[in-house]
Amino acid sequence: MATCIWRRLLLQPVKCRLACQRVKSIYNGTHGFDENEIKEKLRHFPGGSIDLSKGNDGIGVLTLNNPVHKNAFTGTMMIELQDRVKELEDWTEGRGLVVRGAKNTFCSGSDLNTVKAMCSSEEGMKMCMFMQNTLTRLKRLPLISVALVQGKALGGAAELTTACDFRLMTPGSEICFVQKHMGLVPGWGGGARLVQIVGGQQSLKLLSGALRMDPVKALNAGLIDDILPPDEDRALEEAQHWLSQYTKAPAEVIRSLKKVVIAGRELPLEEALKSEKDIFGTLWGGPANLQALARGAKHK
Ligand SMILES: CC[C@H](C(=O)O)C(=O)SCCNC(=O)CCNC(=O)[C@H](O)C(C)(C)COP(=O)(O)OP(=O)(O)OC[C@H]1O[C@@H](n2cnc3c(N)ncnc32)[C@H](O)[C@@H]1OP(=O)(O)O
């Protein structure tokens, strides 16, 4: 049943909105998770914003914007992140996304004032479930996402970078899972995603050592995909240029490629193969395919 819904999610994102809602997120009412209740709490911690611009070229830019507090996530920013991710789910022309912080820094994790005010285990778990849902949906977007890390990405922000398909850093920047120093473990899904990205051994080192990963160390560990040139003011442009090597194709092709990868990453092999066949079927004989055949494309 679950995999059947999955296949519908991959193929008919609009028609199965309600079923998709259940599958895109990890937690819902059946897990005793009341989203409205936690949103109501988070609304008491305002400040900053999450801004989204959607380019005509199909490339979006999502900006964490709270520079007076190093772009720390306030309660309302957590809610806005969910809203922007929902907007991206509905953006059928989208092919790529850059996730970055305002004013040449990335993000210093959760806003410590919010964290201090929600210090019961129960509240912490609800916030964690809310953020896991949002970041899982971000990772499952049918477009290719890249985190542009300028400055520091600490704690929850390091976790956010793992919810993107790729990570880029500028010289002088740093990713650090500081959770150990806070008496915590990652809770926004960043632990599980980190293991998928760099493997169990490296993850254990990064988390238990709270290692400060500069761009070279991060690249060597397989945590990031590239280091950008040292011109901070052109970093966004450079990240968009870097991303373009993976997004140059009609939207339906890029989006289908990402869906194939999501299925391969998340489903048992036989189900992933069936999904791949179904997704393939949506493109075979379609406009991009027919145009390529008419061009007589050669791949020298
Ligand atoms: C552990 C996981 C957890 C989760 O939710 O799962 C978290 O993510 S908890 C948050 C973990 N992050 C931190 O603990 C960051 C603490 N801050 C710092 O280490 C520094 O502020 C740093 C390195 C980000 C920046 O240092 P710098 O010297 O360049 O600047 P300031 O320290 O003067 O910071 C400027 C201004 O921003 C405020 N600030 C920074 N980070 C946060 C934050 N996470 N929450 C709230 N406010 C933050 C800082 O207090 C300064 O404010 P000011 O009023 O000017 O004193």
Image (cartoon, helix red, strand yellow):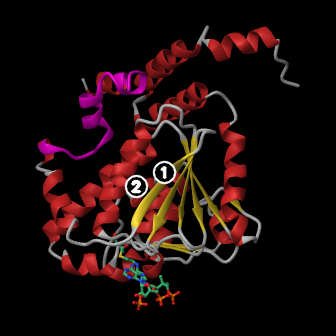
> Principal SS element in the magenta part?
helix
Of the residues shown, which amino acid type is indicated by label 1? Answer: Gln
Q: Position of residue 279 (x, y in %)?
A: 50, 19
Of the residues shown, which amino acid type is indicated by label 2? Answer: Ala
**Residue under the image location 43 percent in, 73 percent down:** 66
**Residue 200 appears in view:** no
**Residue 10 appears in view:** yes
Q: Is residue 288 shown above or below 112?
A: above
Residue closest to the eye, 221 or 288: 288
| Image quadrant where one finds the C terminus | top right
The residue at which mark 1 appears reads as 196
Q: Residues within 10 Å of mark 1 (few under 14, many from 20)?
A: few
Q: Is residue 197 shown above or below 93?
A: below
The residue at which mark 2 appears reads as 192
**Residue contact between numbered discs 2 and 1, judged by CB atoms under 8 Å:** yes
Residue 299 located left or right of residue 267: right
Kindly indicate the quadrant of the structure image that contains residue 295: top right
Based on the picture, tell me whether residue 290 belongs to the magenta stretch: no
Kindly indicate the quadrant of the structure image that contains residue 75: bottom left
Q: Is residue 235 shown above or below 58?
A: below
Numbered range of the magenta stretch: 7-29
- Ligand 1's quadrant is bottom left
Under circle 2, the secondary element is helix
Instruction: Point out which mark residue 154 bears.
Output: none
Q: Position of residue 257 (x, y in %)?
A: 57, 30
**Residue under the image location 40 percent in, 47 percent down:** 85
Q: Position of residue 234 (x, y in %)?
A: 72, 64
